[in-house]
Amino acid sequence: MKTIKILIALCFLFIGGQLFAQNTGLLPYENSTHTYSVTKGTIGTSTLAWTIDVGSDGTEWHVVSGAGTEDITIQWLKAGDYKLRLTETRTDYAGGCPTVREVSIKVVANAFDVFAELNTPADATACATINPSIVVDAGTLGDNSDDVFGTTTRVFKVRSEGLPADVKWEFNYAISHVLDADIGDYVVTVDPANVEDATANPLVVNAGETEVLITVSYTTNDNRQDKDFNLELVLSAVKDATGTPEKDSAAPTNNTIAYSIKAVPATTGITTD
């Protein structure tokens, strides 16, 4: 008897895992949008009416389009159990002779979330990476506008969780250097391994991939970075391939991250009397 109970429990866990790993019309995530369809019969004198057994438009769900047609598109706003019904009624007969179709829908909590993260130490200097480490006075003696003080590189990570392995996801990203530090031109590169197109923005991440690396690099020279500043990554418009936004899309808490970069000591070349 104990073995049977264990097997039943395992089956329940498997089914539950499958249930909460989906985002389909019958098992949608909160805030996801799905379309439901029928093919109308040949009777021309009949009307179609869609209804949902609980809740109200704008609170538990929202009808995006198609309330009186063969196709209806619904955004599910709150987790819960619902019944979606379609009633077809004849208009040329006093009794109407209504027929009803019905499906059960279980809206589950949205588990899809995306995080902006650091991939290297958060607080470090933009130290010179030249070799040898002696800065050469490249221009006029005592002028450092042509001198190269090295290359600074920082790597950001964008990570997702709670998404089925067969579903793509995407996001827009922006890089900014806060505190008005002048770092001149900088180059942003995306690791192409996990995305459809590394030059695109928004980035579309391949199904089954949960991480994307974004690298920012710049040369400390005539537009040298003269003061400490934050190099920031901001994500926006995060959604999966079905158009479902991440679970905290209304007020995202994980979509901004910054490196605190300390300025490179950057004197002029040595002069003498």
Image: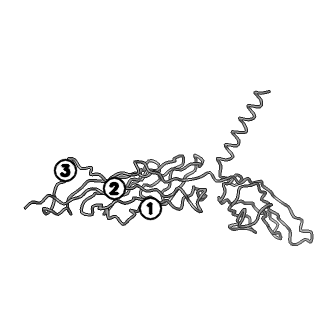
Q: Secondary structure at mark 2?
A: strand
Image spot of residue 96 (x, y percent): 89, 68
**Do the CB atoms of the residues marked 2 and 3 lie less than 8 Å apart?**
no
In this rendering, the answer to whether 12 lies above or below 39 is above
Q: CA distance from mark 1 to mark 3?
A: 34 Å
Instruction: Estimate how packed mark 1 is, as few (under 14), some (14 to 19) or many (20 or more) residues with alpha carbons within 10 Å.
Output: few
**Circle 3 SS class:** loop
**Three-letter amino acid code at the position of disc 1:** Ala
Q: The residue under label 3 is which amino acid type?
A: Ile
Disc nearer the start of the sequence (1/3): 3
Give me the C-alpha separation between circle 2 and circle 1. Answer: 21 Å
Q: Residue 134 shows which numbered tag? A: 3
Q: Residues within 10 Å of mark 3 (few under 14, many from 20)?
A: few
Counting residues from the start of the chain, the first of labels 2 and 3 encountered is: 3
Residues 41 and 33: in front is: 33
User: Gap between marks 2 and 3, in whole Å?
Assistant: 19 Å
The label shown at residue 142 is: none
**Which residue is the site of mark 1?**
174
Q: 114 above or below 71? A: above
- What residue did someone put label 2 on? 262
Position of the N terminus, as image quadrant, is: top right
Q: How is the image coloured?
A: one colour
Where is residue 13? Give x, y as percent: 70, 39
Quadrant location of the C terminus in the rendered image: bottom left
Q: Name the mark nearer the viewer: 2 or 3.
A: 2
The mark lying in front, picked from 1 and 3, is 3
**Mark 2: amino acid:** Lys
Measuring from the top left, give residue 271's x and y in whole percent: 12, 60
